Amino acid sequence: MSEQEIKVPDLGGADEVEVIEITVSAGDSVEAEDPILTVESDKASVELPSPGAGKITKITVKVGDKVKEGDVVGMMEASADSGGSDDSEEKPEGKAEEKSEAKQEEKSEESKPAPKKASGGSRKETVKVPALDGFDNVPVIEINVAEGDTIEADDPLVTVESDKATMEIPSPYSGKVGKILVSEGDKLSEGHELLEMTVQEEGGDEEASEAASEEPAKEEKSESKSEEKPKQQAESAPEPQGATYEPPTPGAKVHAGPAVRKLARELGADLARIKGSGPKGRIIKDDVHAYVKSQLKQAQQGGGVATGSGIPGVKLPDFSQFGEVKREAMSRMMFATANNMQRSWLNVPHVTQFEDADITDMEDFRKAQKAAGEKKGVKMTPLPFLLKACATALAELPQFNVSLDMERKEVVRKQYIHIGIAVDTPNGLMVPVIKDVDKKGLWELAAESAELAQKARDKQLKPAEMQGACFTITSLGGIGGTAFTPIVNTPEVAILGVSKAAMKPVWDGKEFQPRLMLPLSLSYDHRAVNGADAARFTTVLSQLLGDIRTLLL
Ligand code: COA
């Protein structure tokens, strides 16, 4: 066995290309022509094939690296019987691919007919497949436009795929797409008729103004296209099934290499529904596997337990028709929070119980602790009192300290009292958990909640610090509001929302007294908790907060 370099072959004119996926690792055995890695230029993705059969000993590039012809990307030990040789001599798929791209562009330029005359009108053209430089009979894997779309010259019309490369055939004209003459799966060669187009001529008014009215601004085009364009794809795709997976923008263009497309076809996964985690949102094999797993899990969970399955998704309109819009990717946290909220909302029959607690005396006591707090370096806010009161109420009414296991038809009764606190951070909502609240004093709770809230804002929370809560407090009291209906943080069965305390006139039997009233909103899972218990819980809270000496009992 001899060691040989794996080099980037002739890229058919492309200077530098980016490594977007590495398909093998050191130690892998490969056959000749097996893909080693995928590179991408502006217009095409190409798999670099193994120069022979053998074992990969080293990969010397990483995803995101830029490589050019002749660069060494790895080393391999060729098997004794391998016909492997210096790959720079091999016929690279990429060469033909990139060449065809270049040629095709040239040809597109050539095939663009000179404007017949500035007639101020439009003409019909039939767009044909340009020279594919040796590629013959390549199947259409994606149609990127739909009848009626207004497109620019060079916008991709269809995507074709050979064994090893994917290529987009660009439009030679700007104009409006008419009848589409090919379908997915059709095999194309040079000269094959693709589609009809109404091409606007210079100085054109009719079609041009029609096109312009459908396309308010160039910046908007991607928005409009991503939502409207490949209608066949969006319409033929199944409706989203429940809440565990949010598809990306329906009809958005799919970025994936040939091997990934093949895998997706084999597994029956619709690439349009998979969010790519590779560079520039490219879909990699792991994304396909993860998607298929999530779909299977979701299908399994659907059996016997209400998951919200079958609820139709919300169809988005083309917002650009109403005004300018910009799109930005959701952060991972925002996406996870959105999913959790939706899952809880769909699975839990929510009811919210309201109550006002008289915290006039509590506030006097809290304020009296200011000097002591300064000495200790801890600020005493209303939150520690709320934590303590909730811990006492949970102990008194243990039906709130449960989770429901619907599959096993069991109630899980927790013998500990851990409480989550919702913290508003610049990156979104986080819920650190204070353990054993019933065993801690007010100062300890004040210090711990301040520390965890700061950690949340600094993105320093460890996963263990966000797990294990029995109940959650979400306090908007420092901000404002009179009441709200929080969403239960499943699998917990209740959550306490706290709004801003305000002075109110309270009738003491003889006259109105000015009292500081704290609005409480308790949302609960009505499968686990009945309404009478919810009223008991808020009453207990209100009594405890109204006379904090009872917290000691
Ligand atoms: N009524 C009136 N004032 C209140 C109050 C209430 N219910 N709760 C707190 N305050 C006051 C505090 O006393 C403090 O005032 P002070 O500086 O004069 O003493 C001020 O509001 C700010 O308090 P804060 O720093 O928010 O401390 P906290 O301990 O009350 O709250 C968090 C800590 C982490 C809960 C809070 O900062 C937070 O992030 N809240 C938002 C939670 C959220 O976004 N929930 C929504 C989930 S959907």
Image (cartoon, rainbow, N blue to C red):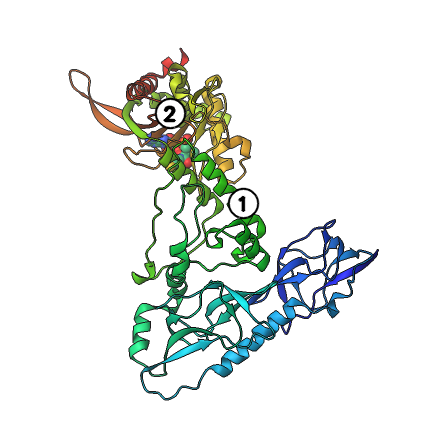
> Which residue, given by chain and number where applicable, does mark 2 sit on?
367
The residue lying furthest to the bottom in this view is 117
Q: Give the residue at the far top of this rendering.
A: 553
For label 2, count other residues whose C-alpha is less than 10 Å away and answer few (under 14), some (14-19) or many (20+): some
User: Is residue 15 visible from the viewing direction of this image?
Assistant: no
Q: How far from the left and from the top, in percent, is residue 170?
A: 48, 72
How far across and down, in percent of the image, does residue 366 sit? 38, 23
Q: Is mark 2 within 8 Å of ligand 1?
A: no
- For the point 35% across and 25% down, the residue is 527
| Residue at point 49%, 21% (across, down) | 436
* Numbered mark located on residue 290 in the image: 1
**Which circle's residue, 2 or 1, is located before the other in the chain?**
1
Q: 164 and 535: which one is in front?
A: 164
Residues at marks 2 and 1, CA–CA distance in whole angstroms:
53 Å
Select label 2 or label 1 by which is in front. 1
Image quarter for ligand 1 equals: top left
The residue lying toward the viewer, choosing from 61 and 30, is 30
Q: Is residue 31 left or right of residue 179?
A: right
Placement of 81 over or under 366, stated as above or below = below
Q: Is residue 341 above or below residue 493?
A: below
Q: Which is nearer the eye, 228 or 449?
A: 228
Q: Residue at x 49, y 51 (%)?
A: 275
- Quarter holding the N terminus is bottom right
Element carrying mark 1: helix
Residue drawn 37% across and 20% down? Answer: 365
- Quadrant the C terminus occupies: top left
